[in-house]
Amino acid sequence: MHDPSFVKRPGGGYLVAHTGDNVALKTSTDRTAFRNAGSVFPGGAPWTTEYTGGSRNLWAPHLSYHNGRYYLYYSASSFGSNRSAIFLATSSSGDSGSWTDQGLVIESQSSSDFNAIDPHMVVDEQGRWWLAFGSFWSGIKMIALDPATGKRTGNQFLSVAGRGGGAIEAPTVFRHGGHYYLFVSFDLCCRGAESTYRVMVGRSTDVTGPYTDRNGTPMTSGGGTEVLAGHGSIHGPGHQDVFADDDNDILAYHYYADDGTALLGINWLLWDSDGWPYVG
C-alpha cells in the first residue's frame, strides 16, 4: 500500500485507508495481519474526475473517529499537478459502501502557490478542529474546520512548514506531552527502491505553530529533525501516520522493498528525555 492512515475501531481492531481506486480499505485485528476490505466508494467517485484526469485512483486519505462517526479526508489530483482537491466523506460504520461524500473542503488551481492534497485532521487541546495539508510548492498549510460539519470555516490560511519549493508533503500532527509534533515527509516518493522519502519532525506548543526542529530551525525555513530514513532493504519510508495505541504510540508508513514493492511499515514510536520522537 501507499499512504496508510489508521483508526482504532470502537468495537476493537483497526481500519486502514490508503491510496487506491475509490480509496482503498483494509482491516486488522492485531496490527500485524491485514485483510482487504473493499473501497470507500465501490460505485465510483465521479465528482473527483475533473481533478484526476478521469482516474479512479484517490490519494492519501486521513481517517479519524469522532462523536460516533468516521471522518475521511481524501485527495483528488494527478501526478505533478496542483490542480487538486480535498474532499470529506463520513460513515457510521467505516465499512465499504457505507460512506456519504460531504463534498469539497478545499481546492487548489494551477495558478495557486500550494497543493491541496495529503490532508490530516487534528483536534487540538481546546477542541478546535484543523486540517493540515500540502505537497511541494510553498509547503504545508493549515486551515480551521467546523466541528459540526468537518468542513472549512473562516478564511484563515496558515503556512506551517516549507522548503522553498522543495520536496515536502504528507503532514501528520500528533500531540504528546506539552507539544504538538508536525511530522512530514521530505524528498521523493514513488520511485520504487530509488525513492528517497524520509520522515522528519518539528514541534510547537501551539497547534498552528511556529514549529521548530531539534536545532531550533523553523520548519517554515526548511527545518526538520530526521525520524526515519532508508536503511538496508527499507527504501524511502514516508507518508507516515502516528497514533496512540494501548501498548505504545505507533508510527505507520509505507516503504519500498528491493524489488520496488510498496509495503506497510509499523514501528513503536518512542520519546527521549527531551521529548523528541525516535523509532523503536
Image (cartoon, grey):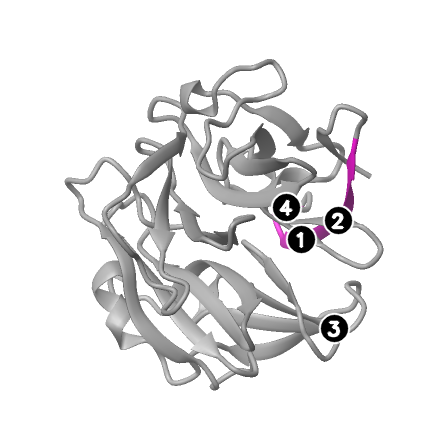
| Nearer mark to the viewer, of 2 and 4 | 2
Q: Which residue is mark 1?
A: 243
Point out the image quarter for the C terminus: top right
Give neighbour class at mark 3: few <14, some 14-19, many 20+ (Cα, 10 Å): few
The amino acid marked with disc number 1 is Phe
| Nearer mark to the viewer, of 4 and 1 | 1
Please tell me the numbered disc located at residue 249: 2
Q: Is residue 33 magenta?
A: no
What SS does tag 1 mark?
strand
Q: CA distance from mark 1 to mark 3?
A: 14 Å
Q: From where the camera sits, is residue 165 visible?
A: yes
Please provide percent x and percent y for residue 43: 38, 85
In the shown orientation, is residue 265 left or right of residue 174?
right
Q: Earlier in the sequence, mark 1 or mark 3?
A: 3
Question: Where does the magenta region start and end?
Answer: 259-271
Circle 2/circle 4 CB separation < 8 Å: no
Please tell me the numbered disc located at residue 256: 4
Q: Earlier in the sequence, mark 3 or mark 4?
A: 3
What SS does tag 3 mark?
loop
Q: Earlier in the sequence, mark 2 or mark 4?
A: 2
Q: Earlier in the sequence, mark 4 or mark 1?
A: 1
Circle 1/circle 3 CB separation < 8 Å: no
In the orientation shown, which residue stands out farthest toward the left?
111
Q: Earlier in the sequence, mark 2 or mark 1?
A: 1
Give neighbour class at mark 2: few <14, some 14-19, many 20+ (Cα, 10 Å): some
Q: Quadrant of residue 34?
A: bottom right
Q: CA distance from mark 2 to mark 4?
A: 23 Å
| Nearer mark to the viewer, of 3 and 4 | 3
